[in-house]
Structure formats: structure tokens, C-alpha cells
Amino acid sequence: MRMTRSSYLALALACTLAHAGARADSTVYKCVDKSGRVEFTDVNKPGCKALDLPGYMPAPRAPTPSNAAPGNPAASMRQGAKPVASPNNFPRVDSATQRARDDDRRAILDEELRAEEQKLANLKRDFNNGEPERQGNEKNYAKYQERVAQMRDDISRSEKNIEALRREIANIR
């Protein structure tokens, strides 16, 4: 039987969950031995590859001495402690580049907002205050009611999209 990628991932997840010593935050490795036998494990051995599992988020690491509070190593673990923004070797972007990126993002979001507002206006026009014109294929009143309900849902979804876009635009620095 030939297994697909999703079958391998499901098998890897099942093996990880079934393994009593496996931690939920550990990386899963796929190992193939010389005879072609496949093994999934949380131990990195020679010839093993780490799997990129969808939805996998590694657990946060314990604080290191470099980011722990001075004089009290447990202080960084308290609730409300300010997290470290990024590691020292994380690539930095100068403010002009970031400003240009933010301006591009704002322009894209503004265009999406305009398109969504136009879509909402068209939907409301067609909705006609809850009494849209009946179409020729709607001799059955239930079909008409179904279309009206779908139109209400579309209007509601479009209004929510507009709210979300406005919030996103407001969050841009």
C-alpha cells in the first residue's frame, strides 16, 4: 500500500500521541533505515528529517540568563513581565524601509476597504430593504426566502469585513 503525505503526517501524529514519553511540544522526526523501514520519533538520529507539521507551534523556551531579570531569574516568568522583542541576531529593518512597507500595506488595505464598501452598497441595493425582486426561477416561495436569507448573510459578512479592515488600518503605525 502506498502512503500519501497526509497519511504519513497522520501516522506521525498518532505515533507521537501513542508514545508515552513523547512531549506535545517536541519535534517529530521521520527516520528511514537502510532496509527502507520508516520510523517516526521525537529523537533526532542520523538520517532523520524533522517534519513540518501543520499547526505545530513549539513551546516557548525557558528564559536564558541574558533575558532574565537582573537579580531574580524567576522574575521573567511572572505574569506581566515584558517579553523580549526579538533576538539580538534578528535582522533589523531601518525606519524608512518600515515606513514604506507600512504605506504599501495601508494602500492595499484602503483599496480592499473601498472594494468591500462598493460590494456592500451593491448588496444593499439588490436587497431592497428586505424585499428584493423575485426572479423568474423563484416560483416557489421557499427559493425566494432562501435567496433573501443568503443576501442577509452576505450583507452581514461584508459589514464584518469592513469593520475588520478599518481595525487593521487603525493598527498601522
Image: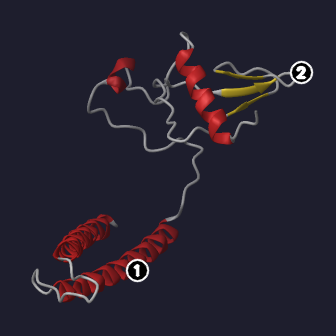
| Corner quadrant of residue 162 | bottom left
SS for callout 1 = helix
The quadrant of the picture occupied by the N terminus is top right
Q: Residues within 10 Å of mark 1 (few under 14, many from 20)?
A: few
Q: Between 87 and 111, which is closer to the camera in this rendering? A: 111
User: What amino acid type should be assigned to the residue bearing mark 2?
Assistant: Ser
Question: Which numbered dot is residue 107?
Answer: 1
Q: Nearer the viewer, residue 13 or 149?
A: 149
Q: Dot 2, crowdedness within 10 Å: few (<14), some or many (≥20)?
A: few
**Which residue is depicted at the point 17% across and 83% down?**
127
Of the 4 image quadrants, the one containing the C terminus is: bottom left
Label disc, if present, on residue 35 of the rendered structure: 2
> Tags 2 and 1 in contact by the CB under 8 Å rule?
no
Q: Is residue 87 above or below residue 118?
A: above
Query: On the rendered structure, is 117 left or right of 20?
Result: left
| Residue extending furthest toward the front | 139
Q: Position of residue 41 (x, y in %)?
A: 66, 20
Identify which residue is drawn at 50% across, 40% down: 55
On screen, residue 10 versus residue 148, left or right, reads right
The number of numbered badges drawn on the structure is 2
Disc 2 vs disc 1: which is toward the camera? Answer: 2
User: Tag 1: residue type?
Assistant: Ala
- Callout 2: helix, strand or loop? loop
Dot placed on the residue nearer the N-terminal end, 2 or 1: 2
In the visual, does 56 lie left or right of 37? left
Q: Is residue 20 above or below residue 64?
A: above
